[in-house]
Amino acid sequence: MENRPKMSREKRAKQFMPFAALTGLEEALRKKERELETVDKPTMSEDQLRELDDKLRSFEYGQMVTVKFYFEGTVGEVSGRFKNIDYLNKQIVLFDKTIKISSILELH
């Protein structure tokens, strides 16, 4: 039997830790997935824009609304209670979210 010095618990644990040989690969793959999932912003007709404007103006404080919107290549949907329209910053304000009016695709 050899007389080797005992390895500290910390050093011993390190040899069993996962090894990331390709640092950044995982993030690069996620970025590529997002690029492949992106969509162009849908274009809206004048009638659709007018309908959105009418709906937006009809909302009342506290009313539950669902907003379908475009953001950075993706289409999302959020629901919440309507608070107001921020005309200065051109956005709709829900109690816990704000959405740029120019990104809105549908309102319910």
Image (tube, grey):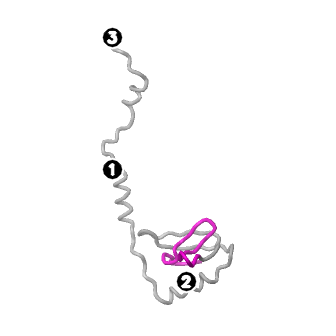
Who's the residue at 50% across and 69% down the image? 76
Q: Position of residue 64 (x, y in %)?
A: 65, 72
How packed mark 2 is, by other alpha carbons closer than 10 Å (few <14, some 14-19, many 20 or more), is some
Residue projecting furthest to the bottom? 47
Badge 3 crowding class, 10 Å Cα cut-off, few under 14, some 14 to 19, many 20 or more, is: few
Q: Residue furthest front?
A: 88
Q: Check disc 2 and give the amino acid type.
A: Leu
Above or below 72: residue 102: below
x 45%, y 84%: residue:
44
Q: Position of residue 77 (x, y in %)?
A: 53, 70
3D distance between C-alphas at marks 3 and 2: 81 Å
Q: Quadrant of the N terminus?
A: top left
CB under 8 Å between callouts 1 and 2?
A: no
Badge number at residue 52: 2
Residue for badge 3: 3
Residue range in magenta is 86-108
Residue of label 1? 25
The tag earlier along the polypeptide, 1 or 3, is 3
Describe the element under mark 3 as helix, strand or loop. Answer: loop
> In the rendered structure, which amino acid carries the disc numbered 3?
Asn
Q: Secondary structure at mark 1?
A: helix
The quarter of the rendered structure image containing the C terminus is bottom right
